[in-house]
Amino acid sequence: MTAVTTKTKARRPRKKTKKKRSSSGRIARREATAETSASTTRRAAVAAVPVVSEPDNNDAAPAEASWLLGDSTSAEVLYRGTRSRQAEWARRSVSDRLAILDRLRAVLADRMEPIAALVREENGKPEVEAISHEVGACIAFVEHLCRVGERHLAGRTEIDAWLPFRVATVTPRPLGVVLIIAPWNVPLAIPFTQTVAALAAGNAVVLKPSEVTPRIGAAIGELLTLAGVPDGLVEIVQGDGKVGAELIDARPDKVFFTGSVATGRRVMAAAARHPIPVCLELGGIDAMIVRDDADLDFAAAAATWGGLFNGGQVCASVERLLVHESVADRVISRLVDRIGELDEDADLGRITSARQRQIYDRHIADARERGLTIACGGRYIGRDKLAPTVIRGPGLRESLVWREETFGPVIAVSTFRDDDHAISLHNDTRFGLTASIISGDVDAADRIAARLDVGAVAINDVAATLYARPALPWGGRGESGFGSSHGREGLLAFTRPHVVDRAAAGLNFKRPWWFPYDSYQREAMRQFALTVARSAPRERVIHAGKLLANLAGQLINTKRL
């Protein structure tokens, strides 16, 4: 990466310069060293980036690992340099690219503690979540990708039985340079896995981390460099939404955005002006359905973790809990008891972005004004945590906490009469990311799952964990976005299909459907269409092939081919 300095010992001293602001308010970058690529001429340090390249050296100087757009370098210049490197990278075989990326497993494992510590410091996750949800998820993704990537990116051959003289190959080709705009709630795993998938497919990447978690984004660049990813293939650009808009206007080949619905709409509108395809992973107010045959202790434990991990700041967290009316009181009692057993320091994530407090205050105030019951929580723990909150009562389904995404440790509990009622309540939302079903009857749960308007359903588990299964596509519908990450579908999202069709050697006569037309051709084409429409599969192929052969023969005999 040009955006990363991996040397941490015996560095040449750098001249200190004052930061100056351009007319647009962005900070111009400091002069680059000789190791910096020509496409990027000024560098900006991100304060206190951990030097993951030296896991045993606690005194190592912080790495400079990110860029800010300023007066001297436009987004267009950045993309030009990255495109030239992408062309070289795309010429490598898939196996060569995967061999380099596979080194990331060891790079991550050797530096697990300092990376997790950075995530805890900048994002506020508990230690267990920083290791498992972030670092561990990245390692699992790389392992899976390098095991199946070559197969997923292989081309295929297509031959139509009624046109046996034509053979086509369909090959996934890289898009070029993709722009990844990352969120602050999963600041390592989301941009890391998307970047690695893009690289495996042969692309270059411009990554803009969230301005709330810039140092984690910078560390991603350093990790890629340590694995041997070529210099300049990934550029990490720091900044806010204005920088993101500038990067879109510079016309990448595709935009992958993860964040809020409101920002996703702006990203889509900006990309549509060019036009540029987009993949949007947006919000959710995901639900867990608890049937009357469920293990209630298990259901309460699942809802507690599903609603509260990462401080509830997850698009797939359990914000709505739908419980059968016959067991609702018992489930809520167990839920509140479980929450009361949590360790505020070890178990609860802090509020990462201060702007979330405004949403929490508005939603909880609305619940109180409606006379809803706050079974627990509804208050802050210190300045940076919201106590886990459970809300229930008549009128809940008209409240903000039920209709809007809270993105915090708040669980709204409502009841249902039967499965049809549960499905109706679940689907009554603009969102559609994931759902969870807890039931002692797996067949009944399967029937419910088939009718839920979401991208993924987990039965007797929390659906958010599906993100950690790299073989499964991850994506939603409605205001939860569109497109996929992970799985074969997510990998191919970083490609475009390239078709090459070939005719058998010697068959260089004019085709029967070419000019000039006559009545014989019209009738032959009509019979061809009817044969395909009405015949059984095997007969269809035989008859259609014979029709085309006869037509070709007739036209050749009359010297019209």
Image: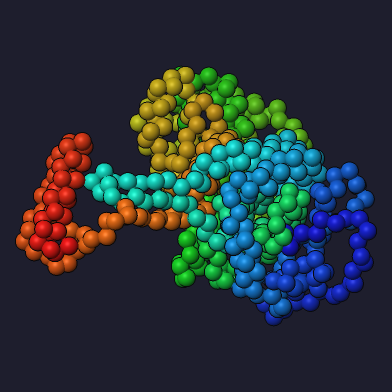
Colouring scheme applied when the structure was drawn:
rainbow
The image quarter in which residue 516 lies: bottom left
Left or right of 482 in this view: 536: left
Left or right of 397 in this view: 551: left
Q: Position of residue 170 (x, y in %)?
A: 42, 51
Residue 242 or 174: which is nearer the viewer?
A: 174
Q: Position of residue 548 (x, y in %)?
A: 17, 51
Relative vertical location of residue 375 with respect to residue 490 in this rendering, above or below: above
Residue 135 visible, this angle: no
Residue 56 or 263: which is nearer the viewer?
A: 56
Residue at image x 26%, y 43%? 161
Q: Position of residue 108 (x, y in %)?
A: 74, 42
The image quarter in which residue 247 lies: bottom right
Pick out the residue farthest to the bottom: 23
Residue 492 visible, this angle: yes
The image quarter in which residue 303 lies: top right
Residue at image x 62%, y 71%? 80
Left or right of 292 in this view: 100: right
> How many numbered marks, from 0 up?
0
Which quarter of the rendered picture does the C terminus lie within?
A: bottom left
Which quarter of the rendered picture does the N terminus lie within?
A: bottom right
Relative vertical location of residue 84 with respect to residue 428 in this rendering, above or below: below
Residue at image x 37%, y 35%? 451
Q: Position of residue 88 (x, y in %)?
A: 62, 61
Residue at image x 66%, y 45%? 99
Relative vertical location of residue 153 with respect to residue 331 in this rendering, above or below: below
Pick out the residue farthest to the left: 519
Left or right of 267 in this view: 60: right
